[in-house]
Image (cartoon, coloured by chain):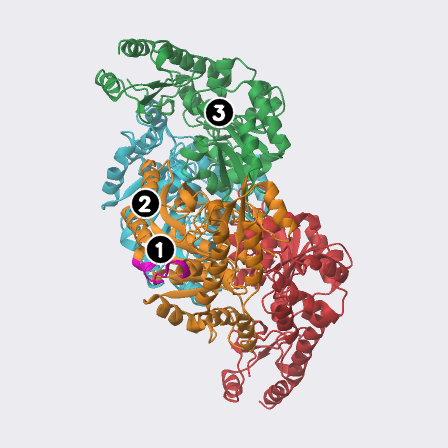
Chain colours: A cyan, B green, C red, D orange
Amino acid sequence: MRFFSDNAAAAHPAVIEAIAASNRLDTAYDGDAYSAQLDAAFSDLFETQVKALWVTTGTAANCLALAALCPPHGAIVCHRDAHIEVDEAGAPGFFTHGAKLMLVDGPGAKLAPDAVGAAIDRIRKDVHQVQPKALSITNATEYGLAYSAGEVGALGETAKRHALRFHMDGARFANAIASTGDRPADVTWRAGVEALSFGFVKNGGLNAEVLILFDTSLADEIAVRRKRAGHLASKGRMLAAQILALLDNDLWLANARAANAAAQALAGAAPDRLVYPVEANEIFLRMTPEEAASLRAAGFDFYDWGAGEIRLVTSWDSDPETVEQLAKAIAAL
Amino acid sequence: MRFFSDNAAAAHPAVIEAIAASNRLDTAYDGDAYSAQLDAAFSDLFETQVKALWVTTGTAANCLALAALCPPHGAIVCHRDAHIEVDEAGAPGFFTHGAKLMLVDGPGAKLAPDAVGAAIDRIRKDVHQVQPKALSITNATEYGLAYSAGEVGALGETAKRHALRFHMDGARFANAIASTGDRPADVTWRAGVEALSFGFVKNGGLNAEVLILFDTSLADEIAVRRKRAGHLASKGRMLAAQILALLDNDLWLANARAANAAAQALAGAAPDRLVYPVEANEIFLRMTPEEAASLRAAGFDFYDWGAGEIRLVTSWDSDPETVEQLAKAIAAL
Amino acid sequence: MRFFSDNAAAAHPAVIEAIAASNRLDTAYDGDAYSAQLDAAFSDLFETQVKALWVTTGTAANCLALAALCPPHGAIVCHRDAHIEVDEAGAPGFFTHGAKLMLVDGPGAKLAPDAVGAAIDRIRKDVHQVQPKALSITNATEYGLAYSAGEVGALGETAKRHALRFHMDGARFANAIASTGDRPADVTWRAGVEALSFGFVKNGGLNAEVLILFDTSLADEIAVRRKRAGHLASKGRMLAAQILALLDNDLWLANARAANAAAQALAGAAPDRLVYPVEANEIFLRMTPEEAASLRAAGFDFYDWGAGEIRLVTSWDSDPETVEQLAKAIAAL
Amino acid sequence: MRFFSDNAAAAHPAVIEAIAASNRLDTAYDGDAYSAQLDAAFSDLFETQVKALWVTTGTAANCLALAALCPPHGAIVCHRDAHIEVDEAGAPGFFTHGAKLMLVDGPGAKLAPDAVGAAIDRIRKDVHQVQPKALSITNATEYGLAYSAGEVGALGETAKRHALRFHMDGARFANAIASTGDRPADVTWRAGVEALSFGFVKNGGLNAEVLILFDTSLADEIAVRRKRAGHLASKGRMLAAQILALLDNDLWLANARAANAAAQALAGAAPDRLVYPVEANEIFLRMTPEEAASLRAAGFDFYDWGAGEIRLVTSWDSDPETVEQLAKAIAAL
């Protein structure tokens, strides 16, 4: 009964079916009939003309975008706990050719305009210090908080004022949207976001993520960078087909709602243990090692998260019965 | 009736089944039960202890290996028509941080020890010129020739003499082995090869290639580089499962034999038109534009390959009847 | 009356004379008779066999060393206020191809073994997090503190325990040695340091720094990297000649002692204002904006250093009379 | 009696004097009074507003410019014998983060529009092949030929048509101008050149080269890249002072004329041995090993240049008597 991570969950059956259905000869790379539908599908979803490029990992989506948004000699402002800083093996440094991450603090891995502005103000405007050129936020954050459209918009203003390009790591964008009920457009391009890593792998996909470019002028360069990074799969149709299957009838949203609902069930079992409000599909709980051990003895798997805390992650396929068992076990501690 | 490229072919049904079968919760990345079998499976196949890492594209396999074998300030000796030079968008330069490709000529995109040695001898041994540090050959070559074990061994000697690390791009390694009947060990590590990009995508796989490390000490560094390049898929079990399905009962070899047989059928139809001997699954034919047009009018698709030449590529699922039709059409020109 | 920085000071007359004396035809690059003397000269000074390569800036010295000591996918542990982090425009990221700086705190920009160890222990040992591969300290530190041989040795032990390569940024190494009276060997290779950026430009040189390699096996690779970074000057003899002039009769040490003595004179004027002990040639003083303004009105130039602090830097040619005037002016505040 | 290379020649006495004269405290880096004069001085010389940045080597000048003109995923068209390809240790790959050099042939290391156009036409316009983004020519060429303003202009047209940025490596720009008598403006920006590496080191300077930016919008980025590459010397005034000394009274032109005249004297001694016309200060002669040996026995030093050829290089300080001796010795062979 694993509550380790959503990225290890199964793919949705509709995704496997879509792969099988696309399994016939077609044009290679992204020249196929499935890939050709992505721009239009996401333009509909985001209510504006976008370019949508499939990639196979969130790290690739994030770093291809950042490489196009920040020069090698620039800095990317992000949260100290951002995935790009903590868990991508230095991939931003690789893709950008050495750009720096400029780390900013904030509760729940969320960035606030003031903190971003203050960090930028500490940089001397000379050639000796690396100048910030881009801003990257994660939505939902690494601690499961969802940005409101207003919050993103305020950061967008900050970015504009300091001439920073603006990227959103949306590995759990679906969970954020399912949580806030915001229109995807409001929390992205209308708020100043220029590129979005839209995650599907944690939400029912097999290995397809999508990089959404609201600044469509970035698309040609990123397409070259994707190939150059070895990320232009020859059977791209099987990536595009997965995504189309998840877009169909808003399956992506249904999946995210299911994961969020499971998280709420767990959060409700221990409101006083919560380290952060539960707004997506991650739950951080205060818990003694003994308590954690007793849950594990009962068959539940999860990560410790620093001293005296644990992390639980639900996913689209979290079994309601198992979730209920865990909720009861936590409540009973 | 497409004879454009094997990389656009369908995946083998057994591969799709293997993906579906692996579609349940397991440990993420390469910590799953499928990935755990790869080292042993390929160690059996190659009759020595190897490390086997899945990646999703041949470009990634090639370039991760080259980055580990050649420092940023070194050069990789390869053929002027090598895929890494011609068709990977400069990916070797990206992964190696700027290493140079040192181009050598040879008929049929094949390298010979003399030509390699002569190119190296032209380099002054000082800090002003980029020094060769690695050798990379493609087997089967970009023109469909298969290296014999003896030929690779002679290049391995050359590499050793000049202190070059030795990489083989085996995007069509299966076709080469099916052609020569050599033991995989003989044409790789026994001949001095230290890393092999073993291609499955062109031969029935969906999106899984394998990097085989005969120098197993490279594995830890390459695992880090794989993550850093955004190539550590979170559901790696679905990559490993594909490969295991293709290894099962030597399906990979059966697939390659089918592709090669189709190529022989086409070659037999026009022995006097052949630009190169047909040893794998690519056929290069001399053909006037008018002849090519008449074939296309009959429904056959393929690439022109320079002036007065065309390229046909067969694959594991080339339909025998279609192949026979094409053979007849060529013979009738 | 400038107390901005020692790097803007004049070169020592002996250095200008040495340049003029070397101004005749000789072999280009580092093949000349002056450059040929460096290894021996520094091997004498450090009481062990070293390789000594001239470069023209401290940034180049630091980053060439770091690139050889840390792979692109590794991290360099350094102080949060280290010059390589704060004032080199991201040069370490450029030279190392994207390695990360892992920032550690400590009073006076000094690193302590415990803090280094704790930072390393926070890194998970997996492919998702960048692993530390090198340690870099600055001696004297950015706040003018000198490491004792024992302190460096303890860091050397820490480095060894964690398999980190060990670099010292010695832009003000001369001032540190002049301060502690340690033998250069004791505070470097005997304490585990493998590469030292030995600064001369701030200490009477014109544009020659020296990279001292105690691990002499690094020399060939670094020589290539130096050329590749555009740092192999064609008239290297004029760099080597400067250094030899400063080594002659320990002029480098006399210069550093003069700068340190000037710093002591200033420190003595305001012991209660000192932010850090003055151990080299930098003095950080608590001072109100009004006080600072009055000093400036009296003709003294210097940097503010955060709120309520100023920085004074002395150099080999600080005029004793001017120093005394400034000391009096400070005392009189 | 060395005829190896002009880069090993002495600096002009006026240059040494200028260094000595600038040897007093001033603002560090390029904030000094000397550096501040460069933009105006070169704007005068080139009859248009330019930005002029000192650097210490030609490799740095070339590669800083190329990094600003070509993205990491692009290619730089240049001659197969260009210095950036042959003799800079892969520095363009380092500075540009992996851009490719696209090699074109042409007699005397000179590029012609047709050859450039043909090479570009061979590149498929897709993401699999590296697309050309910049053109770099050397003037005078590596074989001592000078481009006329018309020839550069024709290349400028080609560059424009293919959307290539245009760089000129002018390590021996002075010799080219001295040879053709063209106005510097006509052979550079009026012909489409956007950045010029203007060499002084081979022509009487000590260690100062200048990067001239006709596209002045590149200056800010290149200033950052210069710092990041460790090329922002702290006593930049001593670089600027050298250059101003050489500009004064057109000393640079007088020096180049002297070198060229010496070359003509040698060329005149053996018109039938010349491999290329002598238009600058390099002379390539057909010569048997025995003949070369006899010259060496007479005390003349020079490089062999392939089988049966030698290279002689004259410089601003070539002693007329020695030149005459060599001319006689050659004529007498």
The residue to which callout 1 is attached is A165
* Chain assignment, label 1: A
Q: Which mark is residue D113?
A: 2
> Is D135 on the left-hand or right-hand side of D332?
left
> Mark 3: which amino acid?
Lys
The residue to which callout 3 is attached is B110
Q: Tell me the quarter of the image containing the N terminus of chain B.
A: top left
Q: Mark 1 or mark 3, which is nearer to you?
A: 3
Secondary structure at badge 1 equals strand
For this rendering, which residue is in front, A204 or A59? A59
* Chain assignment, label 2: D
The answer to if B142 sits in the magenta stretch is no
Mark 2 vs mark 3: same chain?
no
Residue B173, above or below A50: above
* Chain assignment, label 3: B
Residues in magenta? D178-190
Q: Mark 2 or mark 3, which is nearer to you?
A: 2
> Is A269 on the left-hand or right-hand side of A27?
right
Mark 1–mark 2 Cα distance, whole angstroms, equals 39 Å
Please report the residue visible at 39 percent of the width from the left and 60 percent of the height from the top: D177
